[in-house]
Each structure stands twice: as C-alpha cells, then as structure tokens.
Amino acid sequence: MTTIIKDTEALVASVKDADLQRIGIKILSNERISFEDGVLLFERGSLAYLGALANYVREKKHGDKTYFNRNFHIEPTNVCVFSCKFCSYSRLYAHKEEGWELSIDQMLDIVKSYDGKPVTEVHIVGGVHPKMTLSFFLDLLKAIKAHRPELHIKGFTPVELDYMFRKAKVSTEEGMKLAHEAGLDSLPGGGAEIFHPEVRKEICEDKVDAEGWLHIHKVAHDLGMHSNATMLYGHIESFEHRIDHMDRLRKLQDETGGFNTFIPLKFRNKDNDMSHIAESTTIEDMKVYAVARLYLDNFPHIKAYWPMLGRKNAQLTLSFGVNDIDGTIDDTTKIYSMAGSEEQSPTMNTEELVSLIKQVKRQPVERDTLYNEINVF
Ligand code: V47
Ligand code: SF4
C-alpha cells in the first residue's frame, strides 16, 4: 500500500491538467468529488489516470481482496408487460406463448436441485407477468424458506415490486414488509437503467421511474434490508446522465447506508430495439468502472458481472476499481446470452473463478450476500 500511495501521489503531482490534478488531490485526501468533477473525469481523464486513482481507492478499501459468492438464479418468467427498448429477453404478454412461466413447484425444484451444494444465495429476477401476483411470490418466498431457511433470497427489482404492489393495492411500505416477512432478504440492483427522465423516456418509458425505484430501495433499507444498484450504460446517455444517476444513489446511500454494491452493466446490442447503437469500447467500460469507484465514495463495493463483460474484461476491471465478481456456479441466466454477450453459456465453477482472480494477482475471497467472509483462497 505504501508504494501505491507514493506512486499515485507522484502521478497526481505530475499531471499537467490543473482540474484533473485538483480532483486527484481530493481523492488522495479522501475528499468527496463534486458532480462537475465526475463529468470532467469522463471528459478529460485518461484511462491510465482514472485507473490509477480508482485502483488507489480500491486497494485502500480492500487491498487485493476480490469477493465472489456462490449463487444461482431463478427467472420465474420472461413474459413482460413492459417494453424496454434495450431488452432482448422479454416477450410481450401478447406473445406469451413464445415465453416461459414457471410454477412455484418448478421453481422449488430448481432450489432443490442445489440441495447439499454449498450455495448461499438465490437471485430471483424476471419479467413482469400480469398473472404472477404479490400473493404468488409471497407463497414462493415462504416455500423456499420452508425448504432451506438459511438460503439468502435476493429477489425482485422495483420494476417487479412496484407492479405487484399496485396490483395488490398495497402501499410500498406494506408490500415490502409482507415480502420481507415471507422471506425476502435483500434486493438486487436491476431496473435502474439510467435514472434521468430524458433517457428513461427514450428507452424504458412505461416502467417505474427514478423516484419510484429509489423509494422502494429506501423502504427496504428502512426495514433493515440491504440492496444493490446497477446502471445500464453505453447507449444514448451522456456523461452528465451517468453522473446524475450515481449522484442520486450517493445521496440515498448517505441517508440509509443500505447499499452494498454498485454494478455497471454494459449495454449489449443483439436482438433488441436498440441494435443500431454500437456497443461501448473496452476503454470506455474501464472508465465507467473507475469513475464509479471514485464517485461512489460511500458504496463499499463495485462489482463486475462477468457473463456480460466476458472473462478477460472482468479480470481487467480488477485494476479499475472493482473488488467483487459475480456470476459463479451454474449461473444460467439468459438475459445476457440473449442480448449478445460472448458468454453464451455463462457458467464458471468456483475453481475457475478463483484461478481467474489469482491470475491477475488478486486474492479471491468467498463471501455471503452481506459480505461476511466464508473462505479465503
Ligand atoms: O435491469 C437488460 C439489464 C438488468 C440488457 O444485483 C441489459 O447482484 C445489457 O440487474 N444489455 C438485470 N444489460 C440484471 C441485474 C443484475 C445482474 C447481476 C447481478 C445483479 C445484482 C443484478 O439487466 C436490467 C437491465 O439493466 N439488461 N437488457 C442488455 N441488452
Ligand atoms: Fe421487462 Fe425487465 Fe425486459 Fe424491461 S428489462 S422489458 S421490465 S424484462
């Protein structure tokens, strides 16, 4: 750590651009950077400079530790009443015969297929099916907990929750309390996309807005639950939109402290209504991770979701602020393979993930959902 402090101080001192130097000094002094600073980092920061600063923060917070957890996914349905333009995965309710919908028994069978295996978390997320109601999901949560009480259930985005609460005519507060009591332990980060209404109007007009998304996470935090946050980047959004997104998250985190992890999600352009938009370059991807690490000073963790980025780029993110890799055993989620990720079969066993992390000289640490350490490799 001493070397990296000295190296980063020397780098900041040598920077010619006075604004970039000023921001670098703030980071070295543990001072919060402003909205304008965040935009400027995107506009003028070189990959090397952003990487060095983000790696400095990463190593100060976590050293070489790189977390992963053993989880599996359940996708109850890909039928969806919404029509986000970037989505390659959903089938509109009008074409529901092209999609799938699982019964509680079928989902419980998926849980049972992991009996005796050392998984600690199930991640439940899918489309918004009008017939899958709040009471259906409360029964699912109770059935999973009755079968395997210690399994952490991370499930449902505000998009799904907002729809099921409205349909059940319950307030967010009542609905979240019911879900929590039935066994929901935490919320994943999906559905956030880009919060700014200028972008939301263009890419996902009909689903829950920024205020609704943030309110549901706040209510979850107030109940003592933790959650994650994502940002879908690399399409029509500007640098200001990205920083506005992170700024809203940083403000809520100041209030509640309930977020664990921020996960930038790279837009993939296969088979969706935004296929004409070129995907971001690897250089831009790494800059997004680095700026996220620098802007979100109150988020403990920045995560890379390797099934979307690919294995090699996920390794690279570990030098750009990331300290957590997701997508471990038997992660057969379809959302990315359908959107054009090169990882058509996104499964990686623990041994492979551990060696992926060790190959870039970081220390793999298995964690549970709340980042309690289970195994150091
Ligand atoms: O909200 C949809 C994204 C998200 C595309 O919390 C796309 O631990 C890229 O949120 N290109 C769902 N992305 C997945 C998600 C997630 C994944 C892993 C871990 C966690 C966590 C959360 O997937 C959606 C949307 O932003 N998405 N289509 C696409 N074409
Ligand atoms: Fe539905 Fe989610 Fe796809 Fe939007 S991203 S269409 S809410 S499944």
Image (cartoon, grey):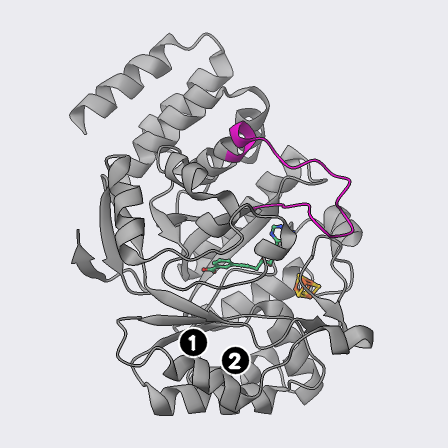
Towards the viewer: 360 or 185 = 360
Residue drawn at x 30%, y 20% as measured from the top left: 8
Within-10-Å neighbours for mark 2: few <14, some 14–19, many 20+: many
Looking at the picture, which amino acid does disc 2 mark? Met
Q: Amino acid at mark 1?
A: Leu
The question of residue 42 being in magenta is answered with: no
367 left or right, relative to 300:
left
| Residue at numbered disc 1 | 223
Percent across and percent down for residue 252 are 50, 56
**How far apart are labels 2 and 1 at the CA level?**
8 Å
Residue 16 relative to residue 371: left or right:
right
Which secondary structure, mark 1? loop
Does the residue at mark 2 contact the one at mark 1 (Cβ under 8 Å)?
yes
Q: Is residue 201 left or right of residue 263?
A: right
Eye-nearest disc, 2 or 1: 2
Q: Residues within 10 Å of mark 1 (few under 14, many from 20)?
A: some
Q: Which mark is residue 176?
A: 2
Identify which residue is drawn at 34% across, 77% down. Answer: 114
Magenta residues (range): 266-285
* Residue 176 percent location from the top left of the image: 52, 80
* Percent x, y of residue 320: 40, 33
